[in-house]
Image (cartoon, grey):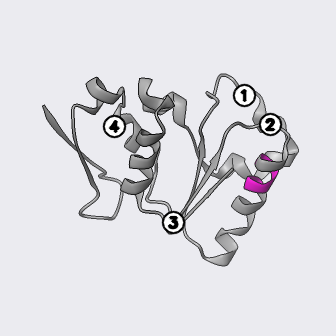
Amino acid sequence: MNRRVGCRRWPLKDCVFDASDLRDRDGVNVARVFEAIAEPPSTVLLIPTLCVGGAEKYAADLVAELPALAQGPVLVLVTDSTSHDVQGWQSLSILAPLRAANLVFWRDICGEGYQNPTVLGRLLNALRPSQVVGQ
């Protein structure tokens, strides 16, 4: 069964992700993935979790500075933690810039296929960001 998931909120006409039974084969909920991403990002930041640490502080600093540099929308993709795992991260002042960011928890939206790095690679390929920054 082929599914064609469009991205109505995105200004790109050809923003379509074609795939054959991704949910059954790879455990990916494609519709939920694209619903969670507000607009096509020019930069994707990949961080494993949200805590007080070097990678997270670096991501917060980038999120704070990129809009001023006219770099376009930024997507922060938390790869290893669920939103439940890191409850209360909003209270950490060091991560304050991330509160207003388009922040997505990969494990929450992807489905069972979140552990497969190929699935994440396919998403990055479909999003076509200018820059990908990861730890």
Instruction: Classify residue 130 as left or right of residue 123.
Output: right
Q: Which residue is mark 1?
A: 86
Q: Tell me if residue 65 is in the magenta stretch.
A: no
Categorize mark 1 by other alpha carbons within 10 Å: few (<14), some (14-19), many (20+): few
Amino acid type of disc 3? Answer: Ser
Circles 1, 4 touching at the beta carbon (< 8 Å): no
Categorize mark 2 by other alpha carbons within 10 Å: few (<14), some (14-19), many (20+): some
Amino acid type of disc 2? Answer: Cys
Q: CA distance from mark 1 to mark 2?
A: 8 Å
Q: Is residue 123 above or below residue 63?
A: above
Amino acid type of disc 4? Answer: Val
- What residue sits 71% from the left and 49% below the top? 98
> Which numbered disc, 3 or 4, marks the residue that appears first in the sequence?
4
Categorize mark 4 by other alpha carbons within 10 Å: few (<14), some (14-19), many (20+): many
Q: Quadrant of the N terminus?
A: top left
Circles 1, 2 touching at the beta carbon (< 8 Å): yes
Q: Which mark is residue 30?
A: 4
Magenta portion: prevailing SS class: helix
> Which numbered disc, 4 or 2, marks the residue that appears first in the sequence?
4
What are the residue bounds of the magenta stretch? 56-60
